Image: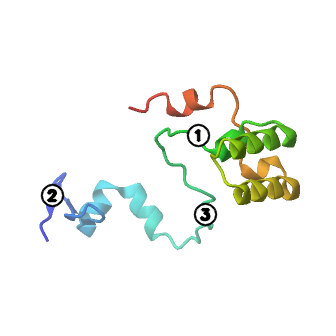
Amino acid sequence: MQEKRTKDFAQISEDKLTIEYDLNDFNESLPNLAKELYEKKESPEIIIEGIRKEEKPNDPGVIDFIQRCKTSEEAFEIINFLEKQGEIDPKEANNLISQIKENGIRSFGPLKTYGHYERNFRNYH
């Protein structure tokens, strides 16, 4: 595996997933990080609840439309309309309606307010 050197002391692997340092160079170049790594303190557990990734905008689906609704009644109208248009089948419509009745409208995600797509996809090319 070929490696290239950076800053005359770090070796980056070809797959760019690991960096190897000479221990002395590491301690001299990054003393604060070295101190943190070598101290025997117990680190707190970090829980990652989710990962935000930039997605490209796409045509909105039934869930996107439901997330714009403020009430269950609005969502039922959207679902019925999409079913009549053939965008969703009756089974999916019934499942969506059941989820709203059992878990509420926000079980599909937070309310998407006016300007949602402009704010989130402004810089998408």
Q: Amino acid at mark 1?
A: Pro
The kind of secondary structure element at disc 1 is loop
Q: Is residue 41 above or below residue 99?
A: below
Locate residue 49, reporting x and y percent: 63, 59
Residue at image mark 1: 60
What residue is at 29 percent from the left and 62 percent from the top? Answer: 26
Q: Are marks 1 and 2 in contact (CB under 8 Å)?
A: no
Locate residue 62, reporting x and y percent: 66, 45
CA–CA distance between discs 3 and 1?
A: 34 Å
What residue is at 14 percent from the left and 64 percent from the top? Answer: 3
Q: Amino acid at mark 3?
A: Ile
Quadrant of the rendered image containing residue 68:
top right
Q: Is residue 52 above or below residue 10?
A: above
**Which numbered dot is residue 46?**
3
Quadrant of the rendered image containing residue 119:
top right
Q: Are marks 3 and 1 in contact (CB under 8 Å)?
A: no
Q: Name the image quarter holding the C terminus.
A: top left
Q: Amino acid at mark 2?
A: Arg
Mark 1 crowd level (few <14, some 14–19, many ≥20, 10 Å Cα): few
